[in-house]
């Protein structure tokens, strides 16, 4: 199968038409006519991931986060993006991103997260995110521990003024700060996401919505094994790359 065929396969389970206008999903580095040997899957296509991919016999990386996102004024070895592009070209590694199309796809990031914590009757928050029923209801602390365990997180932080149990929960994988009002409108008791700012958290909590914050990469990395499984449907051997863009958080 060629890279062009893999792109068509991805389009069957995470249609590129779902990607946001500001996004950059698709083939970012490479040649659509290259024949695929093996596929490496990861959250971030960093230079170490390219090196690992070659060592494992992969000539294509499918990453969740786009390597090229904002317009670049130059491509040099002084930046991680530049080093990654140079390494990919030097080693003949193609790089594909499945970003907001994988976030929003049926069975994608947000659906996987919701299923793992057992949300009942899940529904979309709108553009991004999912809300659902927590049954049986749980105390907030117990629910947070359940989320941490179910997603394999190293930590989770809670902001709340509420003492009532959680009966509805909403979530958005990755940076979902702007959707907390959608979570509140859906009747959620708690909203789980990453990368919320101080005043966003303050506004949400003061309006009665508890906020649970995860580390961005940890939250989305939960979906990578399922992405790899979907990719294997094209008949090409697929492996999950072990490289992470960020080192573990040192908690002091």
Image (tube, rainbow, N blue to C red):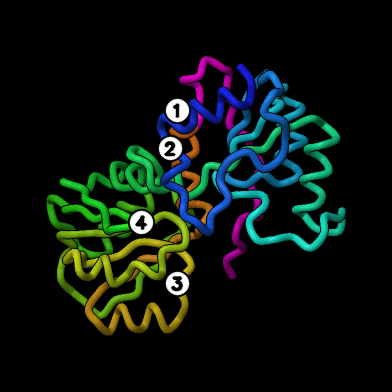
Instruction: Give the residue at mark 3.
Output: 196
Residue depicted at x 51% and y 47%: 99
Observer-nearest residue: 152 or 134? 134
* Mark nearer the viewer, 3 or 1: 1
Residues marked 2 and 1 touching at CB (< 8 Å): yes
Crowd tier of the residue under label 3, counting other residues whose Cα lies within 10 Å: few below 14, some 14–19, many 20 or above: some
Residue depicted at x 59% and y 36%: 62
* First in sequence: mark 3 vs mark 1: 3
Q: CA distance from mark 2 to mark 1?
A: 9 Å
* Mark nearer the viewer, 2 or 1: 2
- Residue 128: which numbered mark, if any? 4
* Mark nearer the viewer, 3 or 2: 2
Q: Main secondary structure of the magenta part?
A: loop
* Mark nearer the viewer, 4 or 3: 4
Where is residue 86, by image quadrant? top right
Residues marked 3 and 1 touching at CB (< 8 Å): no
| Magenta stretch: includes residue 243 | yes
Instruction: Give the residue at mark 1.
Output: 230
Observer-nearest residue: 113 or 163? 113
Residues marked 3 and 2 touching at CB (< 8 Å): no
Residue 127 position within the rendered picture, expressed as x and y whole percent measured from the top left: 34, 57
Q: Secondary structure at mark 3?
A: loop
Where is residue 179, by image quadrant? bottom left
Instruction: Give the residue at mark 2.
Output: 14
Quick one: quadrant of the N terminus? Answer: top right
Crowd tier of the residue under label 1, counting other residues whose Cα lies within 10 Å: few below 14, some 14–19, many 20 or above: some
Quick one: quadrant of the C terminus? Answer: bottom right
> What stretch of residues is rendered in magenta?
228-252
Q: Secondary structure at mark 2?
A: loop
Residue 121 position within the rendered picture, expressed as x and y whole percent measured from the top left: 16, 46
């Amino acid at each position: 199968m060629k890279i062009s065929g893999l792109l068509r396969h991805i389009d069957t389970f995470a249609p590129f038409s779902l990607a946001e206008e500001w996004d950059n999903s698709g083939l970012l580095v490479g040649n659509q006519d290259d024949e695929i040997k093996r596929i490496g899957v990861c959250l971030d296509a960093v230079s170490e991931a390219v090196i690992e991919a070659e060592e494992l016999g992969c000539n294509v990386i499918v990453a969740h986060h786009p390597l090229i996102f904002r317009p670049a004024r130059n491509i040099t070895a002084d930046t991680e993006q530049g080093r990654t592009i140079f390494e990919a070209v030097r080693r003949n590694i193609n790089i594909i991103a499945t970003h907001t199309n994988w976030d929003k796809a049926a069975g994608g990031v947000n659906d996987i997260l919701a299923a793992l914590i057992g949300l009942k009757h899940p529904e979309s928050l709108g553009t991004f995110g999912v809300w659902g029923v927590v049954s049986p209801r749980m105390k907030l602390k117990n629910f947070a521990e359940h989320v941490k365990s179910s997603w394999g997180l190293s930590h989770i932080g809670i902001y709340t003024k509420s003492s009532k149990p959680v009966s509805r929960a909403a979530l958005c994988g990755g940076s979902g700060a702007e959707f907390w009002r959608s979570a509140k409108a859906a009747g959620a008791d708690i909203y789980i996401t990453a990368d919320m700012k101080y005043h966003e958290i303050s506004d949400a909590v003061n309006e009665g919505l508890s906020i649970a914050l995860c580390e961005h990469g940890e939250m989305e990395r939960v979906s990578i094994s399922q992405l790899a499984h979907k990719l294997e449907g094209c008949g090409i051997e697929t492996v999950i790359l072990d490289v992470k863009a960020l080192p573990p958080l040192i908690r002091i």
